[in-house]
Image: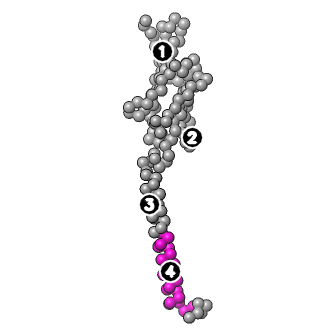
Amino acid sequence: MEFTYEDFEPFCKWKREPNSDTLEIHLPGFKRQQLRVQLSSSGNLVISGERESDSDGKKRNRFRREFNVSNEIEANQIQAKFFNGILYVIMPMRSTAAAAGVDVKASTMNWNKRLAMEIIVAVSSAVAVGVYVTKYCQCSHLGS
């Protein structure tokens, strides 16, 4: 059987939230089985669908959209849900440190070392100033 295809571009809405991005694709008249959500080898999110649009089954509506998935997204945890003609693709964010490629343990250890050095410098400076003041200042209230 030969089909006639009518390509269309569905309405899409991107929502950025603190812990995830959500892509809404409005697909009235589609059923879940008529949709595909895939992650390509290049890391792009590919969403496509196809359905009959007439009673004799010769005419079909179809779409294909491709979205770039940022490094901030935890790609292996992407989920899709279809409800009331809207496809929701939920893309959880990686933790900030993981997205930046930072080793959290090493970063915390470096921060702790830096803090310890700053404390040592501050205490040493305070002691040095105290010794100087008591030795060289001619202050009557300090007593000798």
User: Counting residues from the N terminus, which is met first, the one under dot 3 or under dot 4?
Assistant: 3
Q: Which mark is residue 6?
A: 1
- Asked whether the beta carbons under mark 3 and mark 1 sit within 8 Å of each other, the answer is no
- Image x and y of residue 33, in percent: 52, 19
Q: Which quadrant is the N terminus positioned in? A: top left
**Visual colour scheme:** one colour
Label 2 belongs to which residue?
17
User: Counting residues from the N terminus, which is met first, the one under dot 4 or under dot 2?
Assistant: 2
Calculate the distance from the C-alpha at mark 2 to the C-alpha at mark 3.
31 Å
Q: Which residue is found at the position 49% from the left and 20% from the top?
A: 49
| Pointer 1 local density, CA inside 10 Å: few below 14, some 14–19, many at least 20 | few
- Image x and y of residue 46, in percent: 45, 28
Horizontal relation, residue 113 to residue 22: left or right? left
* Nearest to viewer (mark 4 / mark 2): 4
* Nearest to viewer (mark 2 / mark 1): 2
Which contiguous range is marked in magenta?
A: 118-139
